[in-house]
Amino acid sequence: ASDGELRFVSFTVDPARDTPSVLAAYAKHFEATSGKWFFLTGAASDLNRMSRGVFMLGDVDGSLQHSTRFALMDRSSRIRGYYLTSEADAIPHLIADAKRLLKENL
């Protein structure tokens, strides 16, 4: 992907069930564009470290449900905003903030 492109990354909260083949089927079902939307799994310890330390969501131990939160990160892996899908204006705000961030990074 070239500079300035937006990428989407989804991390599993259930690594025991979400194998790479399961996630590939999920991506295909939702017509995710290869190279733009990534579905990731890994060792529970790594996912816990990311969930707690980076995204501040909680443990990946079977008790964490699929998040209703999007996190917008910049190229330096800094979280620039959280967006709750339960809020009516969350997605328009996410889109506007992502566009601003893309302009910042050009």
Image (tube, rainbow, N blue to C red):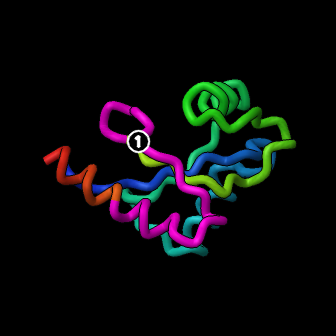
* Residue at position x 86%, y 42% in the image: 63
Residue stretch in magenta: 74-96
Residue 91 point in image, percent of width and height = 48, 67
The vertical placement of 102 against 56, above or below, is below
State the residue in front, 55 or 11.
55
Residue 29 pos. (x, y %):
60, 74
* Location of residue 77 with respect to 19 vertically, above or below: above
> In the rendered view, would you say 28 is above or below 7?
below
Q: How many marks?
A: 1
Residue at x 79% of width, y 51% of height: 65
Tell me where residue 54 sits by quadrant: top right
Magenta-span inclusion, residue 90: yes
**Image spot of residue 15 (x, y percent):** 74, 42
The answer to whether 47 appears left or right of 95 in the picture is right
Q: State the residue in front, 49 or 100.
A: 100
- Indicate yes or no whether the magenta region holds residue 3: no
Residue at image coords 32%, 31%: 76
Q: Residue at x 43, y 69 (%)?
A: 92
Name the residue tied to disc 1: 80
Q: Position of residue 48 (x, y in %)?
A: 69, 29
Q: Give the amino acid at mark 1.
A: Arg
Is 3 on the left-hand or right-hand side of 57?
Answer: left
